[in-house]
């Protein structure tokens, strides 16, 4: 069966930069503490008139231009996001309209930080089946509007951004997305949540005062689970193709915390210099992180034909997964 190839990448980060020093004035924290604990130096914040779909469109246009694909040629748009423009309709519907991609059917995937990996896997299946010929995969988040700016454990972590990939059937044997491997453990759903605003806890004035519409995280539990899950899923993905860590040329990972990445890379026995890092510039951009990272590495000329790329991501749910790509 033919593989799916990534023929274009794009990314977008809002111009507004929030430094660690700025956060020192808001919460009880310090630049040194944030850098040591997370590896983050700054993060981006969308303008007041920017919505998630605006970020997604900006990244998508760059990916489409690189791919040489017009929006009218797209058959499918899948957007990974937990911060859509509104609860209904989907962010993908707005992206489709703004791009003018009239032929494409479009929908969102809510897998938090693993959203773009889930979206890529879904698009890959549609392409392998022959049902579509051109697909746009986007990870886009506007997390600065769902973080609690009084909670130092979470507000220092997250930023806004978007990344996009254009997918098409591979024209080269054995090149492209070799496989994706997805997992969920719903028993850990309470580890990372936005508890208010859904059918379980509709928003009330009391709920807003309690910040139930803001992100809540049990950081230690996330860390412990994330390292183990990323390592196991990546090893399994590589083994399914008879590969080991030595055969990996690049790691493109969701970037939540540099300590999580360092611990996972150490256990996988993959040198850190094989993992493209931009966490220091953008913070945790959730589903946008993986495609933004891929685009940066691609445009920097790091990815060469035939290189083996291990992708990995983990998010709320808990959801996680990995992929093996031969560039």
Image: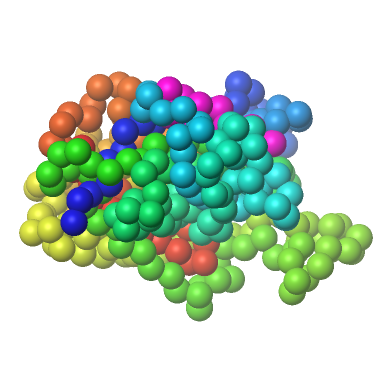
Query: Visible in this render: residue 78?
Result: yes
Q: Which residue: 76% across, 30% down? A: 48
Query: Visible in this render: residue 251?
Result: no
The percent position of residue 119, horizontal first and vertical second, equals 44, 52
Specify the farthest residue to the right.
205
Q: Is residue 253 left or right of residue 216?
A: left
- Is 47 above or below relative to 131? above
Quarter of the figure that contains the C terminus? top left
Q: Is residue 194 left or right of residue 40?
A: right
Q: Quadrant of residue 66?
A: top left
Q: Does the magenta run of residues contain 164?
A: no
Q: Quadrant of residue 182?
A: bottom left
The percent position of residue 98, horizontal first and vertical second, equals 64, 32
Residue 318 or 223: which is nearer the viewer? 318
Magenta span of residues:
51-65
Residue 179 or 43: which is nearer the viewer? 179
Q: Quadrant of residue 180?
A: bottom left
The percent position of residue 4, horizontal first and vertical second, equals 27, 46
Q: Does the magenta run of residues contain 61?
A: yes
Q: Which residue: 83% across, 63% down? A: 203
Q: Which residue: 48% across, 66% down? A: 318
The percent position of residue 10, horizontal first and vertical second, equals 43, 29
């Amino acid at each position: 069966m033919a593989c799916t190839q990534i023929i274009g990448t794009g990314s977008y980060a809002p111009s507004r930069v929030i430094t660690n020093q700025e956060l020192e004035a808001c919460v009880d924290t310090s630049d040194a503490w944030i850098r040591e604990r997370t590896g983050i130096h700054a993060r981006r914040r969308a303008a007041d008139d920017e919505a998630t779909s605006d970020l997604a469109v900006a990244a998508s246009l760059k990916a489409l231009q690189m791919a040489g694909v017009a929006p009218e040629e797209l058959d499918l748009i899948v957007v990974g996001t937990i911060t859509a423009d509104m609860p209904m309709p989907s962010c993908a519907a707005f992206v489709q309209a703004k791009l003018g991609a009239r032929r494409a059917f479009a929908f969102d995937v809510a897998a938090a930080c693993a959203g773009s990996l889930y979206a890529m896997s879904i698009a890959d299946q549609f392409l392998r089946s022959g049902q579509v010929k051109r697909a746009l995969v986007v990870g886009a988040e506007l997390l600065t509007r769902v973080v609690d700016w009084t909670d130092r454990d979470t507000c220092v972590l997250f930023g806004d951004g978007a990344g996009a990939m254009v997918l098409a059937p591979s024209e080269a044997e054995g090149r492209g997305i070799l496989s994706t491997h997805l997992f969920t453990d719903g028993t850990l759903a309470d580890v990372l949540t936005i508890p208010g605003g859904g059918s379980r806890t509709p928003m009330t004035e009391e709920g807003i005062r309690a910040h139930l519409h803001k992100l809540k995280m049990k950081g230690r539990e996330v860390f412990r689970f994330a390292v183990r899950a990323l390592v196991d899923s990546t090893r399994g993905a590589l083994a399914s193709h008879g590969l080991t860590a030595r055969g990996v040329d690049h790691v493109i990972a969701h970037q939540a915390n540099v300590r999580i990445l360092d611990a996972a890379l150490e256990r996988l026995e993959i040198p850190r210099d094989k993992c493209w890092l931009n966490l220091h510039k953008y913070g945790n951009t959730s589903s946008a992180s993986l495609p933004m990272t891929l685009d940066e590495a691609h445009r920097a000329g790091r990815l060469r034909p035939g290189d083996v790329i291990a992708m990995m991501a983990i998010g709320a749910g808990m959801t996680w997964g990995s992929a093996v790509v031969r560039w």
